[in-house]
Amino acid sequence: MAVTLKDIAAEAGVSLMTVSNVVNGKQARVSAATRERILRIVKDRGYVPSASARSLAAKSSRLVGLLVPAEDRTSLTISPHTVEAIGTLERELRQLDYHLMLRGIAHRAEITEALRSWQLDGAVLLGFNDPEIDRLTAGVVGDVALVAMDSYSENPLALGVRSDDFGGAEQAVSHLVALGHRRIAFAGPAFSATGVVRQRFEGYRTVLEANGIAFDQSLVADVETTHAGGLAYGRRLTRERPDVTAVFTTADILAIGLIEGLAAEGRSVPGDVSVIGYDDSDLAVYVTPKLTTVAQDLPDKAAETVRLIMDRLAGKARPEHHTTLGVRLIERGTAAPPARQGGGAAGTA
Amino acid sequence: MAVTLKDIAAEAGVSLMTVSNVVNGKQARVSAATRERILRIVKDRGYVPSASARSLAAKSSRLVGLLVPAEDRTSLTISPHTVEAIGTLERELRQLDYHLMLRGIAHRAEITEALRSWQLDGAVLLGFNDPEIDRLTAGVVGDVALVAMDSYSENPLALGVRSDDFGGAEQAVSHLVALGHRRIAFAGPAFSATGVVRQRFEGYRTVLEANGIAFDQSLVADVETTHAGGLAYGRRLTRERPDVTAVFTTADILAIGLIEGLAAEGRSVPGDVSVIGYDDSDLAVYVTPKLTTVAQDLPDKAAETVRLIMDRLAGKARPEHHTTLGVRLIERGTAAPPARQGGGAAGTA
DNA sequence: CATGATAGGTTTAGCGCTATACCTAGTTCG
DNA sequence: CGAACTAGGTATAGCGCTAAACCTATCATG
């Protein structure tokens, strides 16, 4: 068996608790000399505390769950661009000597089971939509720090970190309007009363109305967040609404599919139609022309998530249980003034 | 506090151990009636066993580490296409009631620390190169099941799952040769004596020689596995070796950059140059023309990884400590016969 | 001088679970 | 008819750690 606290205590000629205190850096009553001696032995013998024993004896497991949606028979659904967030999450936690447990959640019961079984100190909900979050967190009790990423749930049990989806849409659509576009479509997956896509839609609508452009429901398309979805939409749009000169989409991959669909119908981007994506994924710079898109700072989001968890664990109450992070439009090559008319207003001078 | 074994035992009027045996499904001496009764109560009270108490008392933690390279200050380096493997890994483990702990490894010592601290039953090394694996596993003792993905390390301590990199290269390059190409370049990151890229290189060379094409060292390029790397290489290749009619690359992203680099120099794919990628990432179908590439079955690889771990934990010795999975060429749009001649006549010398 | 206050520890009592040894009444068998 | 098995349990002793209460010299203070 591995070396334990007891071994160290015996070798140092002190009690167990003294070693425990030293190892855990408690500024308790231990003389500098004793501390030094113990630390030496700990290092020499390669002592590593047992996390399970710690979790059992103390309250804290120093473990945070990363809970993502999963089906029973299929694997986790992690969107590629959240990988960056996961990496940052892990690093931030590791630096605080916390650790990440990756767990797919297929059924409601699994979430409480995971929390209880491993005595998780905290959990991050990644990729669930709002109704799910409310349903899942309903049974959660105790003092676990729950943070939902990209949630607009108002369940006070779950803290939230999100980026400014409304503002992102505002920036994108304002840019299109400033370029002179008037017939601007919105393409994204069906949205519920709340949630990320809804926010972006509201941002879109708000900008239109602020600029005196009548909102046209027929310009709002329910498009799946996939390349294929965008492609099909591109063809459909060309046939059904050739008057549209710009499309604001809720995902880069959708935008890229859309561009291909438009191209298949003989329409070029941004010559005939301007397209703006969302997420600034790696993809955005691989296509030609490079995609104009809305970027969020994923590492920052992950760091804020960790901060929220730690504050909650430390008992620091935050006034708001949601944090909203800024977002910015990255102008690249897929948004330009409309072809025919300059649109009256500014344009790009 | 949550309900414990003791609570269940009290309510059922039996001893602790009887409940423990029932909960763990031991076919020990418990009457059917008692078993039923206990199971009822367990369900009613929503009892969830404490994983930490279990790990402490038993040998097994039912925890598997997913160890990935990390820098001190930057986040994990998870290549986007391995996300699919991670998802499958998690699901397979979850179905066996094992769980996944995600852990970045920046220093050698962290690996043993992680294993010891959490008493991991197993660990998957993802994204390390062979020398690293040998170095990292050097200090590992005990009966942990260590599986390295995509490793050609011969360290018997670490089991390995990999795909047939040599064969994948063979298929790709044979395809190019069959199309009539004679001047075929190899583009990939610098490789060590062992490892994935080395295997692909050997496959490339073997096919050339088998077809009477002299191996030309100047056709082997050290190119970083990035879009930018491929792009720069595309320009360089056009200027330095315009006679090359086909390139076999070790990554889709590199291939896509390469295609863009060639385009920038006025050369089209596959008209002027054929390009084959590797990995069949999502990207491959987003570009136009769609990328011809080599695909591996990631879910299968993950499942095999779990199988290796479980066999090792069950004490089942496998004859070989490496498993090699099949791979197949996906013919799409970037490989075609060379423009001028199919013949053996060297173009511009 | 009694009276604290401090520094520098130690002792005790678990956390929730499992392995192992042990017990007891009924059955089988030579 | 007593030994040897069973089936169906129970009792005990930890796993490695921590929280909390407790001890004991030593020093300063009014």
Image (cartoon, coloured by chain):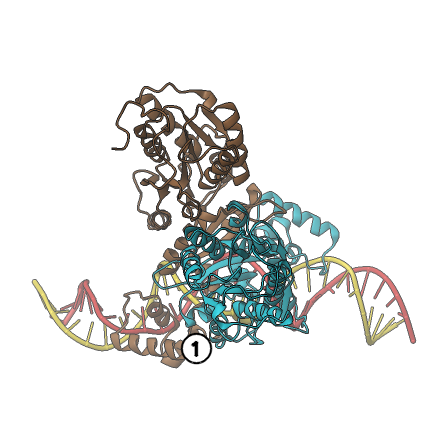
Chain colours: A brown, B cyan, C red, D yellow
Nearest the viewer among B165 and C19 is: B165
Nearest the viewer among C26 and D6 is: D6
- Quarter of the image where one finds residue A152: top left
Q: How many marks?
A: 1
State the SS at label 1. helix
Nearest the viewer among B229 and A322 is: B229
Q: Position of residue A302 (x, y in %)?
A: 38, 49
Residue at coordinates 45% horizontally, 73% vertically from top-left? A4
Q: Residues within 10 Å of mark 1 (few under 14, many from 20)?
A: some
**Chain designation of label 1:** A
**Does residue B303 show up?**
yes
Nearest the viewer among B149 and A140 is: B149
Where A6 falls versus A168 (above or below)? below
Amino acid at pointer 1: Asp
Residue at coordinates 39% horizontally, 31% vertically from top-left? A199
Q: Quadrant of the C terminus of chain A?
A: top left
Q: Position of residue B134 (x, y in %)?
A: 50, 75
The residue tagged 1 is: A7
Q: Position of residue B34 (x, y in %)?
A: 70, 51
- Quarter of the image where one finds residue A60: bottom left
Q: Position of residue A92 (x, y in %)?
A: 36, 56
Where A318 falls versus A83 (above or below)? above
